[in-house]
Image: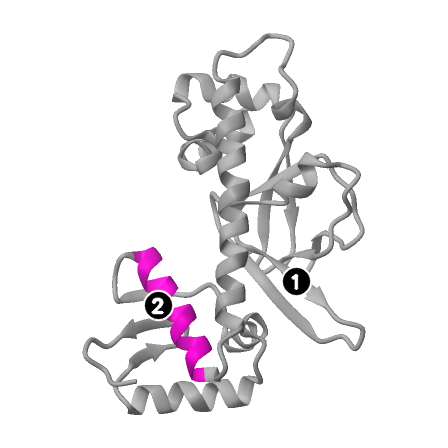
Amino acid sequence: MNSLDRYLPLIGRSPLFDGIGANDLEALLACLDVRTRSFEKGEAVLRMGDVTTRMGMVLEGAVRLERDDYWGNRSILASFGPGQSFAEVCACEPDLPLDVNVVAADDALVLFLDVGRVTTMCSSSCAFHARLVRNLLGLIAKRAHSLTRKIEHVSKRTTRAKLLSYLSEQAEAAESNRFAIPFDRQELADYLSVDRSAMCAELSRMKRDGLVDFHKNRFKIVQGGSL
């Protein structure tokens, strides 16, 4: 567990361990049989069709959920950075194979936790176990909500409307009109299911029209812009 000492503050701030004191966290991680693994950028963390009883939490770098269609066209479903978790749903139901690929978006260090030890009371009957189960259910509910929001974005009729929907959500999450997004231009196009060139042209028009300002992945929503 000593190798995790530097990450304990990050792990403790994650929604999965909300309400669990720092003094209990190390014992709880031992109970969950945690393991860490490093991945190089572009390497598969989990593959479509895999079955697992372990969910992941990003300690360094980032991972994203991707799906490729029959012709090799990529769709990005979500991106996760340090302190965020993934694969909770499939880990809760080990007979349910993954229907996405989990790929390292950057060089990444991932903590894997045995969800079977969350959903089954441990032999030591941890006092904080019930809180952990509630937190896990909350994570799954938030994941479902996040996917619903993505559907809202991509269901908009125009590229501008998709961009405005997504950027508005990011501003709300940051509680600021200035924020960074976790995607480069190609990844953003894949996330919104639009053509990259058309999307970049639309961003330029939005900037000209006074809706947004941006530099690389940092954006500012301009107050008072006209749709």
Q: Residues within 10 Å of mark 1 (few under 14, many from 20)?
A: many
Q: Nearer the viewer, residue 108 or 129?
A: 129
Q: Is residue 113 above or below residue 215?
A: above
The residue under the point 49% across, 37% down is 138
The three-letter code of the residue at mark 2 reads: Ser
Position of residue 222 measured from the top left corner of the image (x, y, whole percent): 23, 77
Question: Which SS class for mark 1?
Answer: strand
Relative depth, front residue between 123 and 7: 123
Residue ID for mark 1: 66
Instruction: Give the amino acid at mark 1.
Output: Glu
* Magenta-span inclusion, residue 164: yes
Q: Residue at x 58, y 76 (%)?
A: 193
- Which of these two is toward me, 1 or 84? 84
Prevailing secondary structure class for the magenta stretch in the rendered image: helix
Residue located beneath label 2 in the image: 168
Q: Which residues are magenta?
A: 160-174
Farthest-out residue, left: 224
**Residue 119, percent from left and from top:** 63, 25
| Nearer-N-terminus badge (1/2) | 1
